[in-house]
């Protein structure tokens, strides 16, 4: 069929399909740009669809955007000498390619770009805040003037972040340009509310944006008592009963919660609910969830406490078939933890992401191994964090050894992601890698705490066998504090010869909350 398409003149379509398959492989896309004009024209929009989310050490792409600026804002920027940094011409209208925009990431990128300017002594300011605000406004004006049709726009409000003073500037600009809101396909809201005047102003502006858009698809609510959000979810002023598909509860306190039946009853297309690291999953909350008559799919559950294991068992019995992501970080009470894992094994057959966080030697190996075996067909992301004291402890070491020696028996033939945060002995690690030579792991991250040097086994069983695509290793011991393989440039070049891409640990590591927020 491919040959027939080539001969029938569909080479452009086939080439685009090939390049689109590489849309998240940025280094390969950069290489595609250099092949010829056709490949360049097809690859550039993919490289520039979400530039603020790409982890990079070079933020000069902001200067390329600012090249498109005209009018008073450009005049004001030139007063800072920015005109000397901007390119004289560009090959494409790069702002028109933006499809995904996250305010937090844009503000973060501007901050990083500004730091690079200071480091290179290219700019000297009296007011850093005024300059950044001018750049934010300039970038947003460029996006508006290009009538960008965003696939996804994300408002992320976390007041503890350093960029909080700038967020409301953006919200006010959005409200002044309502056509921008109407051109947004998906509006995602991540709001963590605090009780102060500044937060109230931001909250009110966000609510106005939601009302204007009327197409809210996803909302993340976090770090507050849940009743404060009922005014949003129950209000008749907001018409997202037929659009809101995903709710993520993050670090919510569910104490004294009521009216869950009303909240979920009015959401007609709600596809998934995610409960991550929340407090007081108690009798009142769980009983209300269990008693809901409207179908509800709990797809993510990360537990930080076990208040009533019997009720939790009923919750898993009813919703376990929908559960795709599970994790826990629980202190003490081994008997409750043991029963919890047995319930997960019994009722949850479709787990894709399992995030294991254990302390010292409390891990219950036989039950965990049985659980992993039970979800082997669906498991695609596995993160194992054994949080240990740095004081040598033979029981802890034996715990890690047991896990490594047995893990090779229950891993599926393919994993998208595997994270190991352990005290690693080279003998155990060698046996693990030798035992999983038929397993392909797309992304492997390792944080070796107070363990042996494992690079020899990495090269022998991973590099030479070409069974992974992306690799990140961080090392901590008495002599080395958080040394990253990515910083060992000669070693990185060797891995590159085997088509293994070494990245920094912080960039490649996938946290449970970040995974859920990005996937759903």
Image (tube, helix red, strand yellow):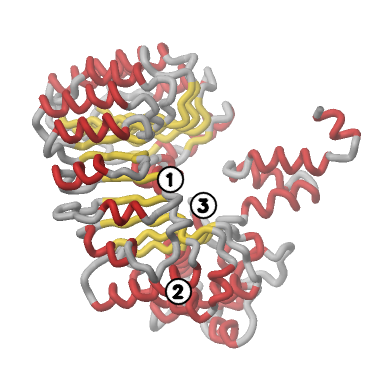
- Label 2 vs label 1, nearer the camera: 1
- Label 3 vs label 1, nearer the camera: 1
Query: Circle 2 is placed at which residue position?
Result: 170
Crowding around mark 3 (Cα neighbors within 10 Å: few <14, some 14 to 19, many 20+) is some
| Vertical relation: 176 (above or below) 56 | below
Query: Circle 3 is placed at which residue position?
Result: 54
The quadrant where residue 339 appears: top left
Residue 43 spot, x, y in % from top left: 69, 49
Residue 400 spot, x, y in % from top left: 23, 21
* Callout 2 secondary element: helix
| Vertical relation: 463 (above or below) 405 | below
Query: Circle 1 is placed at which residue position?
Result: 271
Out of 17 and 179, give the one closest to the viewer.
179
Residue 106 lies left or right of residue 323; in this view the side is: right
Q: Quadrant of the N terminus?
A: top right
Query: From mark 3 to mark 1, how far is it between C-alphas?
Result: 28 Å
* Callout 3 secondary element: loop
């Amino acid at each position: 069929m491919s040959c027939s398409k080539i001969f029938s003149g569909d080479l452009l379509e086939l080439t685009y399909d090939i390049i689109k398959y590489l849309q998240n492989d940025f280094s390969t896309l950069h290489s595609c740009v250099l092949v010829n004009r056709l490949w360049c024209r097809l690859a550039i929009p993919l490289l520039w669809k979400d530039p603020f989310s790409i982890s990079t050490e070079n933020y000069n792409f902001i200067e390329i955007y600012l090249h498109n600026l005209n009018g008073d804002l450009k005049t004001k920027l030139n007063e800072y000498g920015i005109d000397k940094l901007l390119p004289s011409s560009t090959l494409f209208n790069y702002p028109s390619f933006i499809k995904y925009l996250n305010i937090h990431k844009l503000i973060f990128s501007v901050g990083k770009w500004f730091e690079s300017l200071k480091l290179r002594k290219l700019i000297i300011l009296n007011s850093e805040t005024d300059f950044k605000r001018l750049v934010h406004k300039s970038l947003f004006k460029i996006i508006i003037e290009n009538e960008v049709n965003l696939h996804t726009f994300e408002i992320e409000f976390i007041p503890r972040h350093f960029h909080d003073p700038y967020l409301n500037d953006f919200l006010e600009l959005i409200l002044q340009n309502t056509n921008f809101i109407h051109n947004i396909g998906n509006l995602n809201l991540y709001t963590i509310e605090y009780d102060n005047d500044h937060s109230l102003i931001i909250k009110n502006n966000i609510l106005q944006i939601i009302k204007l858009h009327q197409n809210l698809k996803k909302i993340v609510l976090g770090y507050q008592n849940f009743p404060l959000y009922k005014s949003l979810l129950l209000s008749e002023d907001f018409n997202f009963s037929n659009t809101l598909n995903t709710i993520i509860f993050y670090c919510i306190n569910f104490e004294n919660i009521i009216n869950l039946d009303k909240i979920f009853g009015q959401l007609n297309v709600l596809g998934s609910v995610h409960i991550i690291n929340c407090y007081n999953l108690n009798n009142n909350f769980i009983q209300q969830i269990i008693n809901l008559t409207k179908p509800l799919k709990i797809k993510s559950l990360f537990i930080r406490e076990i208040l009533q294991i019997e009720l939790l068992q009923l919750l898993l019995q009813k919703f376990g078939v929908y559960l795709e992501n599970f994790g826990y970080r629980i202190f003490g009470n081994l008997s409750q933890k043991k029963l919890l894992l047995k319930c997960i094994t019994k009722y949850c057959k479709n787990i894709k992401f399992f995030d294991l966080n254990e302390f010292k030697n409390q891990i219950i190996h036989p039950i965990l191994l049985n659980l992993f075996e039970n979800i082997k067909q669906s498991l695609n992301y596995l993160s194992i964090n054994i949080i240990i004291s740095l004081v040598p402890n033979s029981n802890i070491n034996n715990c890690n050894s047991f896990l490594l020696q047995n893990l090779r028996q229950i891993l599926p033939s393919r994993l998208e992601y595997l994270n190991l945060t352990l005290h690693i002995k080279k003998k155990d690690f060698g046996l693990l890698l030798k035992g999983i030579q038929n397993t392909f792991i797309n992304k492997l991250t390792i944080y070796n705490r107070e363990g042996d040097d494992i690079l020899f086994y990495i090269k022998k069983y991973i590099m030479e066998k070409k069974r992974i695509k992306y690799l990140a290793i961080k090392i901590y011991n008495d002599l080395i504090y958080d040394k990253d393989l990515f910083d060992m440039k000669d070693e990185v070049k060797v891995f590159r010869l085997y088509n293994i891409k070494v990245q920094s640990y912080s960039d490649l590591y996938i946290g449970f909350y970040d995974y859920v927020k990005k996937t759903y």
